[in-house]
Structures are given as structure tokens and as C-alpha cells.
Image (tube, rainbow, N blue to C red):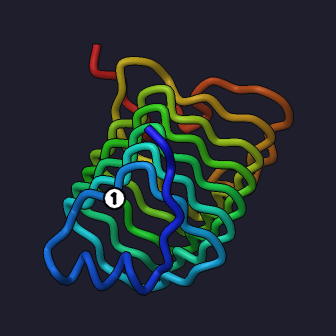
């Protein structure tokens, strides 16, 4: 399926009108800080340079989405499907995930300081060059460095 660029104003207008299907959209250089989005389907979406600080995502589908250079500071990502989602060079300081499917989620060059990463999955998330919640930098590749909070469903 082809991806379609969308402006933040159109996304918000359609969302308020009741549309929840935003699969395969491309959103760039936008500000969604502090917005609350529930039950939105962003499967396969691509976000580039988007400010998502303080966003509240609840019961959203983000599977196979890609986030490049996005600011998620203090975001709440609750009961969302993040299966096979990829995050590149994103800022996750203070992020709270709860009851999210983290199966095969990729985190590349992410700062997780003060974040609370809770979730489940059939396969572990994969991380490269991350800073953990406690401020410890982990260079290179690591499977699931959130051992205290990540639970597998097996």
C-alpha cells in the first residue's frame, strides 16, 4: 500500500470528525504535543521530526510504524500495539508505556531516562545504542534491556 503525506491539521480535523484509520500516512515536521488520541490506527505510518511530547496514546495500533527524530518526552502510551514498530533517534525521557505489545519493537539510539517501559510480547524488543531508564548507556545491540519491567507472555 502506498504511503500518503498528511498535514497535522488534516489529521486532527479527521480525528475530531470520527475518523480513526490513518494507516500508512506520512507526517513530517508537525506538533502533536499534549494531544490525546484513542483507538487510532497508525499501522505502517511514518513520522519524521514530529513533536509528540506529552501525547496520550490509548489503545492505538502502531504496528510496523516508523518514528524518526521524534520527541516523545513525558508521553503516555497505554495499551497500544507496538509490534514491529521502529523508533530511530527518538527522545523517550519520562515516557510511560503500560500494557503495550512490544513484540519485535526496535529502539535505535533512544534516550529512556526516567521512562517506565512496561509491556509484554511473544518476542523481545531489540535495542541499539540506548540510554536506559537509570541513565546507563548500553552501546551496540541488546535484547530487552528493560529486564525489570518487560514481561513475556510465554
Quarter the C terminus occupies: top left
Q: Residue at x 42, y 76 (%)?
A: 55
Mark 1 crowd level (few <14, some 14–19, many ≥20, 10 Å Cα): some
Taking 11 as reference, is 62 above or below it?
Answer: above
Q: Would you place residue 28 above or below residue 4 in this image? A: below
Q: Residue furthest left?
A: 18
| Numbered marks: total | 1
Horizontal relation, residue 141 to residue 9: left or right = right
Disc 1 element: loop
Pointer 1 residue: 22
Q: Quadrant of residue 22?
A: bottom left
Front residue of 126/151: it is 126
For the N terminus, give its image quadrant.
Answer: top left
- For the point 80% across and 41% down, the residue is 129
From this viewpoint, which residue is outermost toward the right?
A: 139
Left or right placement of residue 19 versus residue 12 in this view:
left
Q: Position of residue 8 (x, y in %)?
A: 47, 80
Q: Position of residue 121 (x, y in %)?
A: 36, 27
The residue depicted at 37 percent of the width and 60 percent of the height is 77
Q: Can you name the residue that lies furthest to the top here? A: 154
Residue 19 vertical position relative to residue 106 in the rendered view, above or below = below
- 42 versus 50 height, above or below: above
Q: Position of residue 99 (x, y in %)?
A: 27, 46
Q: Residue drawn at (50%, 40%), measured in percent from left and top? A: 85
Amino acid at each position: 500500500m502506498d504511503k500518503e503525506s498528511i498535514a497535522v491539521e488534516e489529521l486532527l480535523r479527521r480525528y475530531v470528525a470520527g475518523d480513526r484509520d490513518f494507516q500508512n500516512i506520512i507526517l513530517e515536521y508537525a506538533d502533536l504535543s499534549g494531544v490525546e488520541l484513542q483507538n487510532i490506527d497508525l499501522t505502517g505510518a511514518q513520522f519524521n521530526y514530529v513533536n509528540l511530547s506529552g501525547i496520550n496514546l490509548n489503545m492505538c495500533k502502531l504496528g510496523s510504524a516508523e518514528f524518526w527524530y521524534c520527541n516523545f518526552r513525558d508521553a503516555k502510551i497505554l495499551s497500544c500495539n507496538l509490534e514491529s514498530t521502529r523508533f530511530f533517534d527518538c527522545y523517550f525521557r519520562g515516557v510511560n508505556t503500560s500494557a503495550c505489545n512490544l513484540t519485535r519493537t526496535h529502539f535505535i539510539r533512544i534516550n529512556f531516562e526516567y521512562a517506565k517501559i512496561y509491556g509484554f510480547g511473544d518476542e523481545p524488543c531489540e535495542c541499539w545504542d540506548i540510554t536506559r531508564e537509570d541513565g546507563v548507556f548500553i552501546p551496540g545491540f541488546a535484547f530487552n534491556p528493560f529486564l525489570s519491567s518487560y514481561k513475556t507472555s510465554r
